[in-house]
Amino acid sequence: RENRFYWSMGPQLKGVEIQDGLLKIHSSPVEKIFVKLENRNYYRKQVLPGESLEYAEFPLTGKEGWLRVEVKDSRGLLAGTSAFFIDQLAAD
């Protein structure tokens, strides 16, 4: 009902939140965490093959429009969120 969901081929998104102007993303071990933006730009954090990460944070300007989070694991499997606007996740 609130359009809060994520899809997955295997990796898990364990938390996506906005706090103090930062987008914070927690996941199962993955090689890439990236955020697609409305204006076709993106934010990305990735590690070398064989390494993994489970957390990333990105500073937000407030001009991103909608966002969509995706992660990719070492097997090339993806998980991602529905698109959302910053105010839908911002902590009060």
Image: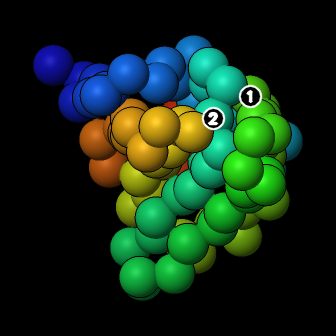
Left or right for 43, reference 72: right
Q: Secondary structure at mark 2?
A: strand
Residue found at x 43% / y 45%: 76
Amino acid at the residue labelled 2 = Val
Q: Residue 77 at x, y = what percent? A: 39, 38
Q: Which mark is residue 82?
A: none
Left or right for 62, reference 12: right
CA distance separating discs 2 and 1? 6 Å
Residue found at x 40% / y 61%: 66
Quadrant for the C terminus, please: top right
Residue found at x 54% / y 58%: 35
- The residue wearing badge 1 is 54
Residue 58, placed above or below residue 63: above
Give the crowd class for mark 1: few <14, some 14-19, many >=20 residues within 10 Å.
some
* Farthest-out residue, left: 1
**Which tag, 2 or 1, sits closer to the chain's start?**
2
Give the crowd class for mark 2: few <14, some 14-19, many >=20 residues within 10 Å.
many
Residue 33, placed above or below residue 63: above
- Nearest the viewer among 83 and 72 is 72
Q: Is residue 15 visible?
A: no
Amino acid at the residue labelled 1 = Glu
Whether label 2 touches label 1, CB < 8 Å: yes
Left or right for 52, reference 5: right
Answer with the quarter of the image where residue 64 lies.
bottom right
Q: Residue 26 at x, y = what percent? A: 68, 26
- Nearest the viewer among 8 and 89 is 8
- The residue wearing badge 2 is 30
